[in-house]
Image (cartoon, rainbow, N blue to C red):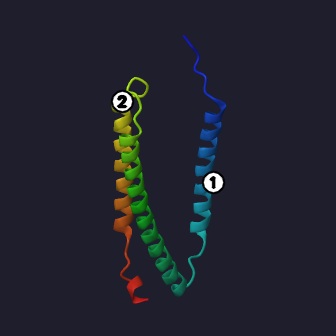
Amino acid sequence: MMAVVVPLTLIIALVTGVLSIVVAIIFSILVFREDPGNEDMIKISKYIEDGAKKFLWVQYRILSIFVLVLFVVILLFLRISYSIVALSLESIEFFLKEIIIELGDLIYVFTQLDCTELSSL
């Protein structure tokens, strides 16, 4: 039986990824423990939050269009011999799952938008 050798770069990437998630959780806990401020500060923070959600929605839309166009260009114009690289069912399934996850994120961001208060500014 052969031993599995994991490259050092993969181990470093995994450790730093987990570490960054832990640090993000710690920072979010510290931020949410702080006092939200008076009524005006809460109102302003709501406007900022709504604007940030709208900005993310626009960015996701632009990025999804770009990724779709790039995918089509690579698929159509970058002819690679079938004997060298073949799309397997697993890779297509992975790609479709990622698209569905991104669409779910877009729908979530879109449903969280409440820009009715922004129009009164």
Q: Which mark is residue 99?
A: none
Q: Is residue 118 left or right of residue 17?
A: left
* Quarter where residue 60 is shown: bottom left
**On screen, residue 11 above or below 116:** above
Select label 2 or label 1 by which is in front: 2
Please count the marks in the image.
Answer: 2
**What secondary structure is found at the residue carrying circle 2?**
loop
* Quarter where residue 91 is shown: top left
Q: Amino acid at mark 1?
A: Val
Q: Is residue 26 left or right of residue 68?
A: right
Estimate the spatial distance between the alpha carbons at disc 2 and disc 1, rounded to whole Å.
37 Å
Q: Amino acid at mark 2?
A: Ser
List x then y, in percent, for residue 24: 59, 56
Residue drawn at point x = 61 percent, y = 22 percent: 5
Disc 1 marks which residue? 23
List x then y, in percent, for residue 67: 41, 52
Disc 2 marks which residue? 88
Residue drawn at point x = 35 percent, y = 55 percent: 104
Q: Is residue 36 left or right of residue 94?
A: right
Residue drawn at point x = 62 percent, y = 57 percent: 26
List x then y, in percent, for residue 84: 43, 25
**What secondary structure is found at the residue carrying circle 1?**
helix
Residue drawn at point x = 58 percent, y = 61 percent: 29
* Quarter where residue 41 is shown: bottom right
